[in-house]
Image (cartoon, grey):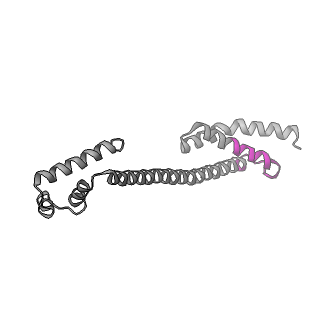
Amino acid sequence: MLSRKKKEQFSVLYDRHYRRLYNYAYKVLKEKEIAEELVQESFIKLWQKIDSISTVERSIESYLITVLKNKIIDHHRKNNTKNKHLNLYALNQDSQQEMNQAWELSDQIQSIYASMNQKTLEIFRLSREQGLSYKEIASQKNISIKTVELHISKALSIFREQLKNYL
């Protein structure tokens, strides 16, 4: 148990060093609440070790500064780790959401293909998947270019209507 004299000495040390330590912590952290918290934690550590620390004023000041610096370093280390995890989590959430949307879109496209007229689907796939020109498709299917245009236009219209939520 600390004597009344030790408590008074601690109070004097607190009054003498608090502002300087706070200013240092705030200058480094740029956050008022965290600076206050770390300075308080530094004084708590001093309080816990007061009996084992020499009462020479300079050594107590050095002790407090060292404790505060270590607390700031620990704070940065914890925040960097926390921020890395938060960033990875957010990235993972975004990736998961994008992947879910891609699967949903793929399912929707397959559903559109299944509902499409067979002739329109064949012509659309020749155009979009095989990259054939309208003229090449017309020649291959023995139909007019206008008919190819009609089927492609019809397919695109179906896609626009069915995928309007994705556009």
On the image, the x and y values in percent for residue 22 come to 62, 39
Q: Is residue 61 above or below residue 126?
A: above
Q: In the drawing, does residue 98 fall left or right of residue 68?
A: left
Instruction: Judge by depth and name the residue closer to the eye, 32 or 14.
Output: 32
Dominant SS in magenta: helix
Residue 136, quarter of the rendered image:
bottom left
Instruction: Judge by depth and name the residue closer to the eye, 149 or 167.
Output: 149
In the rendered image, is residue 167 in sight? no
Q: Is residue 106 above or below residue 38?
A: below
Q: How many marks?
A: 0
Instruction: Judge by depth and name the residue closer to the eye, 51 or 86.
Output: 86
Q: In the drawing, does residue 153 fall left or right of residue 90?
A: left
On the image, the x and y values in percent for residue 143 come to 12, 57
Q: Residue at x 75, y 36 (%)?
A: 12
Quarter of the image with the C terminus in it: top left
Q: Residue at x 20, y 51 (%)?
A: 152
In the rendered image, is residue 117 in sight? yes
Q: Residue at x 77, y 36 (%)?
A: 11
Q: Residue at x 69, y 41 (%)?
A: 40
On the image, the x and y values in percent for residue 91 come to 47, 52
Quarter of the image with the N terminus in it: top right
On the image, the x and y values in percent for residue 8 come to 81, 36
Magenta span includes 57: yes
Magenta span includes 9: no
Q: In the drawing, does residue 5 fall left or right of residue 154?
A: right
Which residues are the magenta region?
40-59
